[in-house]
Image: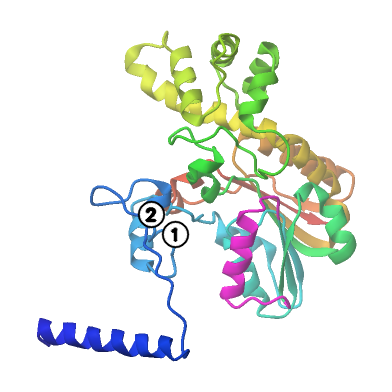
Amino acid sequence: MMVSEKRKNIRQTGKKMNEKLENGMGEAPVHKRRVRYSGTHPKKFSEKYKEHNPEKYQDTIEKVISKGSTPAGMHISICVQEILDFLQIKPGMKGLDATLGYGGHSRKMLEKLQGDGHLYGLDIDPIEIVKTEKRLRDAGFSEDVFTAIHQNFANIDLVAKEHGPFDFLLADLGVSSMQIDNPERGFTYKQEGPLDLRLNPNAGISAAERLKEVTTEELIWMLTDNADEPYAEKIARKIIEKRRKGKPVETTTQLAEVVEAALLSVPEKERKEAVKKSCARVFQALRIDVNSEFEVLETFLNKLPDVMSPGGRVAILTFHSGEDRLVKQAFKEGKRAGLYSDIATEVIRPSAQECAKNPRARSTKMRWAIRA
């Protein structure tokens, strides 16, 4: 077809549409221009329109994942096969995904139910739970088999009172990539954003507000206990020094700059890597603090046996030593008390192939227990 003929057809189509509108036969389509960006590839989170639409741009998503990256706005589930192998989900069972997140694990568990049974998914994040519920509904999982509940997993007893007990449970304790990648949530030092770090931005106080009230001693303890930060004292004193000078840390990049300033005594050839690792640990420590993650996990672990069916199975994914110690201890104590018939004696780790495909899987440890 010649270019002139194409233009003629376009004009005729437009004329017919206008006639329909004038006669009240249709509604004008709303044209939403996509976000423009400089250069050949989008760099900012908000500009990556293809990655935000994985169903529409599958080729782009596969390219990003093949390079060992996680597409913006997505989360790649970890240890999926290992979890399914252990949970042994069968049609007719009732399960709980205590940390719904992007819904990748839930989708695979729902497939195992084959439309017979029910899965409940909990999430404290009011922003992501809405997106995930729609994502699973669009995948064909109706209210008959799946229910999303905006609830902290520390309150599993309240959920079980109405919907339990459960034959299988999963708790993935990692922060979802959607939260890490979105600079508006303040989870990463790599992009400018408000220093928030709350899993539920509508509750509690942000990390920035926390740093305005914490003492030097409390901050040193927080960085040490929550993240094993070797430069905890130097970083804490630098943060408090900035606050006393009337320049409190309020953004993600400001915190990264303070960490870098605190590590100036580190030899230059080692400094870049040291700053990178300390930034990651400092953000982890603050996130654990503002979300009371250890307290929430302890509460969850204490209530866990009471919400499980006899013979019920639970798998938990942890991502740092503090979490893993709590899970390991709770499972050991539960077995000694006769609450669990069997527990994992060794952690299960993702394969080398999975870690190569998804670098965020490297620190993952999986532990499991079976209800007596």
Q: Is residue 63 above or below residue 349?
A: below
Residue 231 spot, x, y in % from top left: 53, 15
Marks 1 and 2, how far apart at CA: 6 Å
Q: Is residue 271 left or right of residue 327?
A: left
Which is nearer the eye, 312 or 23? 23
**Which residue carries the number 2 mark?**
48
222 in magenta:
no
Residue 36 spot, x, y in % from top left: 32, 54
134 in magenta:
yes
Q: Is residue 329 left or right of residue 208?
A: right
Q: Is residue 48 above or below residue 244?
A: below
What residue is shown at x 30% (from left), y 50% (from top)?
37
Q: Secondary structure at mark 2?
A: loop
- Name the amino acid, label 2: Lys
Q: Is residue 213 above or below residue 125?
A: above
Residue 174 spot, x, y in % from top left: 60, 45
Residue 159 spot, x, y in % from top left: 83, 58
Judge the density around disc 1: few (<14), some (14-19), many (≥20) Cα neighbours within 10 Å.
some
Confirm whether residue 362 shows in the render: no
* Outermost residue to the front: 22
Q: Secondary structure at mark 1?
A: loop
What residue is shown at x 65% (from left), y 46% (from top)?
173
Say if mark 1 contacts mark 2, CB within 8 Å.
Answer: yes
Which is nearer the eye, 241 or 67? 241
**In which image quadrant can residue 314 be found?**
bottom right
Q: Is residue 6 left or right of residue 187?
A: left
Looking at the rendering, the stretch of residues picked out in magenta corresponds to: 123-144
Query: How many discs mark residues in the rendered view?
Result: 2
**Which residue carries the number 1 mark?**
52
